[in-house]
Amino acid sequence: MELTAKGMEVRIGKKEIVKNVSLLVKNQQFVGLIGPNGCGKSTLLKSIYKSLVPQKGTVFLDDMDVLKTSEKKVSQRLGVVGQFNEMNFDLTVGQMVMLGRTPHKKLLESDKREDYAIVEEALARTNLLDYKDRSFLSLSGGEKQRVILARTIAQQPKFMILDEPTNHLDIRYQLEILSCVKGLNIGVLAALHDLEMAAYYCDYLYAIKNGEVYAHGTPEQVLTPETIESLYQVKCQTYINPVTNGLGFAFGI
Ligand SMILES: Nc1ncnc2c1ncn2[C@@H]1O[C@H](COP(=O)(O)OP(=O)(O)OP(=O)(O)O)[C@@H](O)[C@H]1O
């Protein structure tokens, strides 16, 4: 499934936060959104997944006009792992992940054997089988993050948007989560702060600065010292990471 966002503009109050951004995620591509704090990544993603209404722009998932289609229909195809996942009421991990099945059910329809099997598989993919009966609110930040990903996997979306999915996660789980998402073989658009991970997992990158696309291309094209220095106001040198054989980065101020 292909995502096409064109001419996205978001203003909050008088401030222009997203300025005429267009981007494309081709079928099964893993596309990363990078850029400094406050450059507009989350706002852009929210305007794409209907959490806020852009002043201008269109979003299509293949031929589905996302901004004009009902939430339920969109959720049958698009899964979202947002940045903040706080809840005020408690559910078990199993119940939380079962919520991912909601878009595929009719009102008050009960859970079927197939739904339980899908939930088990999502828990297995995220290494959470042992947590199934734990209370969600008792989990650590990183564990909660994995549950939210499991819920989104159980939704069986054809496209996934993730806003800093590795927030709260230790190094091992950062790698596991991104490998897990990559292994879904669906289109992915993810805001990522870690440039080595972006270089390693992404097929294509959009760098955002002051609400605009500053650069886009393959990780090798975008993640040059010059672009990184301009985006983040740091000194930077790139090298080949001896462990991953991917791009590595050394920073200083
Ligand atoms: N509801 C709001 N009211 C006022 N300003 C807002 C609102 N939401 C976002 N902003 C501002 O818009 C700018 C972009 O915020 P956004 O969260 O999109 O950035 P980001 O690139 O995702 O940052 P980070 O990397 O820190 O998560 C920031 O300056 C933020 O303060």
Image (cartoon, grey):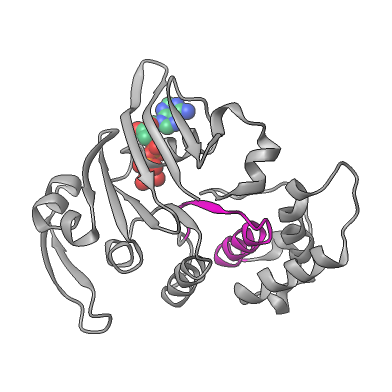
Question: Which quadrant holds residue 24?
Answer: top left
Tell me where residue 139 appears, x and y as whole percent. Answer: 66, 66
Q: Is residue 105 left or right of residue 213?
A: right
Q: Can residue 89 be spotted in the picture?
A: no
Tell me where residue 193 appears, x and y as whole percent. Answer: 34, 56
Tell me where residue 137 appears, x and y as whole percent. Answer: 70, 59
Seen as rendered, the residue at the extreme bottom is 243
Q: Nearer the viewer, residue 141 or 35?
A: 35
The residue sitting at 34% across, 40% down in the picture is 23
The residue sitting at 62% across, 77% down in the picture is 127
Quick check: which quadrant has ligand 1? top left
Seen as rendered, the residue at the extreme front is 63
Which image quarter is the C terminus in? bottom left
Q: Nearer the viewer, residue 86 or 94?
A: 94
Check residue 152 for magenta coloring.
yes
* Magenta segment boundaries in residue numbering: 140-165
The residue sitting at 15% across, 47% down in the picture is 233
Tell me: residue 103, above or below residue 55: below
